[in-house]
Amino acid sequence: MTVDLVKPRAVPYADAVRVFSSRARDDDGALRSLSPDRLSVQNISCNVVVGLNPCEREDRQLVHFDVDVSTTVAREPENAFDFRRLARDIRQEVESSEFVSLESLASLVARITLRHATQPDDVVTIRAAKPKALVFADAAEVEIVRTSHDYPAMTRIEDPAPGFGLDPPLDPSALGLLAQDGVSAPGSSSPQGQHFAAIALGSNLGDRFANIEAALQLLESPELISAFEEPEESKSLAVINTSFLYESAPMYVTDQPNFLNCACIIRTTVAPLKLLKVLKAIERTVGRVPSIRNGPRAVDLDVLFYDDAHIDTRPDSRRASLEDLEGHLVVPHPRMAEREFVLRPLFDMVPDFVHPAFRKPIHEMLSDVLKTAPVGSPAMIKVMPFPRYPRPPHHAPPVAHAPAIPHTQAYWKFPPTRSAAVPAGHNATSPRRRTRLMATLNVTPDSFSDGSDHTTLPAALDYAASSAAAGADIVDVGGYSTRPGAANVSPEEETRRVVPVIEAIRALPDDAAEDARAKGRRRAAAAAANANARDVLISVDTFRADVARSAVLAGANCINDVHAFTGPDCPPTAASARLASMKRVARELAVPVVLMHSRGDAGANKDYSAYGSVVRGVAQELGRKVEAIVRGPGGVRRWLVMVDPGIGFSKSVEGNLQLLRESASIVAADARTEDGAWNPLRGYPHLVGVSRKSFLGAILLQEDDEGPYQGRQTTPKERGWATAAAVACAVQQGAAVVRVHDVFELGDVVRVADAIWS
C-alpha cells in the first residue's frame, strides 16, 4: 500500500505539505516499510538578503525552498511532524540572515530542518531557488542533501548543558538530568530562531579583568541589543559558555603590554551584521579608542563562528587581502588558524567543533599551531583573577559604564601542563609552576582538628597574620564544621562567626614605620605581618548563598563550597534551588569559586563500584555539577572555577589514597570518558586538602607487616608529618593549591616539592 497525501495551503507562506508512505504486510502479518517515509513542505517563500554582488545586498529578494525529510521512523499521532513550526522557523531564521551564497542559505535551512527531524539517520533534501536572479532563466537553483553527521556544530557548538540530577549520583545510567536555566536538554531542538556564535575577547589596557567582565555583561544586556534592532522585533542574546582566561604575549606588534584572552559561546537571534555592530558598540562603551592595527586596546571582540556559516561582506576588490577588515564581517575568522590565543579558548569549550572551511576539529588546529611554534616563544598562561572587596568608598569603578564590576586585587597564574592530545608547546617557554598555600582558619567550636582554637577575634587575627607572614596565598575562613556528626548551625550564626573575622582582617593597622622608630624591630615585624594579613586573599568556606554574599561584601575574595553549590543532602533534595542561588551570587560578585566533590555526610556514602573506581566516580559526579554551574545562561565564568576532589569526604582510606596519587587524572586535558566525550573537568586548576585528616590517622594506626612499629592512635594535631607526605604527593600531582593548617611548616614542604617536581 502506498499513500501520497498532499494538503494545499496547510501552512502560511508555502504551497503545500506532503506525506509519502509505503508499507507491506509480511507473512506473519507484521507491517514493514518498503522505503523511507518522505515528509515535505513545498515552495516556502522568504524575502532575504542573499548574494555576492553589491546590488543584491541593497534589498531583500524572493527565495523559494522545497524541504524534504526522508525518515525510517514512523510518526505516531502523539508525535506528529510539526510542519507549521518548521515552516515558521525557516522563514524567521532565513529572513534574519545575510548570507553571500545560496548554497550557505540552503545549508542553514537543512540545519533547521534536521533540528525538527530529530532522528540521527534522517536525510534532508533542500531545494533553494532565486526566481529573479537571472534574465534568461526561470531561476538560479541549488539542491543539497544533508544528515546530522554533516553538522558537527549541532552537537558541538550549541552546547546543551545538562542540569544537575536530583537522583542519587551513584549510577550514571539512572541519573535524571534536568534542563537548567533555559538551556536545551541533550537531544531537544534549539529555541525558535536561535543561532550560536563563538566570540573572542581580548584586553591589554587598564584593569584587563574588569574590561573582559564588563564586555560580557554588556553582551548580555537587552538594553544594548535593542539599540540596534527594530522596536517590533524581539531579539535575545545569552552567553552560554566561557573558556578559561589566558595571559599571552602580544602578537604582530610586540612592543605593548601582555594580553588577556578568552572566548565565549552565545545563543542569539541577532543577525550576523547586527551582531558585529553590537560588538563594536561594546568596545567603545568599555573604553576602546582608535589605535594602530593590532595595537593595544581596552577590549577587543571578534566573531569567530556564526553557526557553521561562511560570511564575507567585503567587495571583491578587497578580498585578496586581510589587511583591512574594518566595517566588514568575515566568518569564520580568517586568522584563527595561526592564533593560539584564539584556538586555545575554543578548545576549552568546543574541542571537536569542525572548522567549516578547514574541515578540521579545533583540537587538531590547536595542536598544529603548537607544534610549529618558534623555539623560545612564550607559552600562554592560564590565570584566575580575585576581585577587591569590600569596595573602596568613593572610588571610581574600573569601567565607567559598569559600576557593579569590582576592581581586581590580584591574580594567580597557572603555567600549562603537557598533554598527549594538545601539547603545551614543546618550543614554548613558561614560568615554573608554584603550588599555592591556603591557610585553614576555622572559627568554630567543633572542627575536627582545631575546634575552639580560633573562636575569639584576637586568636583568629593572630592566625591570619602569622599565616600571611609564613607565606599563605589565601586564608580560608569557615564557620560551619563539616566533620561527621557536627552540630547544625543556622545561617545567621554562621554569618556572625565569619563576617567579623573577615572585617577585622581587612581593618588591620599598617603602622610598621612608626613602630620601627619608636618600639623596636620586633614590633615593627609584627606590624608588617599585620599589613600583609590585611591584604591577604580571603575565601569563605560555606555552602550557603546568603553567608557567601555577606562574607564577600565584607572583604572575602573567593567562595569555597564543599558541596559544589548543591548543599549537604545526599541525595540533594533541593539541588536546583541551591545551585541557582549560589550561581547567582558568584556571578553577581564575579568571585572565584572552589567546587568540591562530596556526598553529604563526610563519613558515609563511600561506594563507587558503579563507576569502576573512585577516581572515575569523582570525575563524573563533580563534572556534572561543574558543567551545570559553568554552562548555560547565568553560568559562572570558567576561569573563576577551581575543583577539589574532596579527599576525606565520603571515601574509604584506599579511595583517598587512590585519589591523592591520581588527582592529576581528574583534570587531565586529554582525558576522554568511555563514550568518547572529553573529560568535563579537563583543564581546571585543582585544590587538594589533606591536612590532619582521619585517613592519615587510620594509616598511622596500622602496624607494620614486617617491623617493630605497632601502630598508634593520633589526634589530628599529631598528624603534621603525615600531612607533609600527602602534601608532597599533591604537589607532584600538579595541585594548584594545597589547603593546610600549619602554614610555616608545610610551606617548606611545598617549596622543596615544587623544586623537585616543577
Image (cartoon, rainbow, N blue to C red):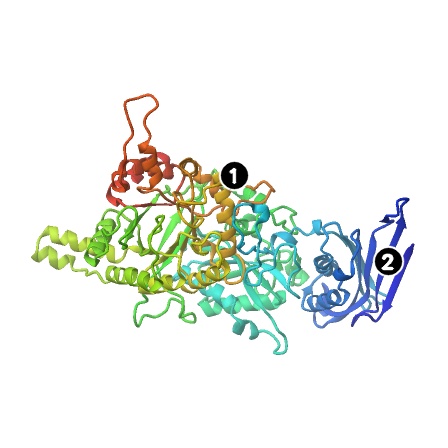
Number of the label disc, if any, that sits on residue 247: none
- The answer to whether 661 is drawn above or below residue 406 in the figure is above
For label 1, the residue is 609
The foreground one among 100 and 81 is: 81
For label 2, the residue is 20
In the rendered image, the quadrant that contains the C terminus is top left
Outermost residue toward the top? 706
The foreground one among 111 and 85 is: 85
Give me the C-alpha separation between circle 2 and circle 1.
Answer: 50 Å
Q: Position of residue 658 (x, y in %)?
A: 43, 36
Query: Could one spot residue 150 in this view of the protein?
Result: yes
Q: Are marks 2 and 1 in contact (CB under 8 Å)?
A: no
Query: Could one spot residue 136 in this view of the protein?
Result: no
- Mark 2: give few (<14), some (14-19) or many (20+) Cα within 10 Å: some
The foreground one among 584 and 407 is: 584
Relative to 369, 550 lies left or right: left
Relative to 21, 232 lies left or right: left
The foreground one among 23 and 261 is: 23
Give the residue type at disc 1. Ser
Rendering quarter of residue 738: top left
Q: Going from the N terminus, do you reach mark 2 or mark 1 first? A: 2
In the rendered image, the quadrant that contains the N terminus is bottom right
Disc 1, SS:
loop
- The answer to whether 111 is drawn above or below residue 404 in the figure is above
How many numbered circles are shown? 2
Disc 2, SS:
strand
Q: Position of residue 360 (x, y in %)?
A: 63, 46
Q: Position of residue 466 (x, y in %)?
A: 21, 50
Give the residue type at disc 2. Phe
Relative to 164, 354 lies left or right: right
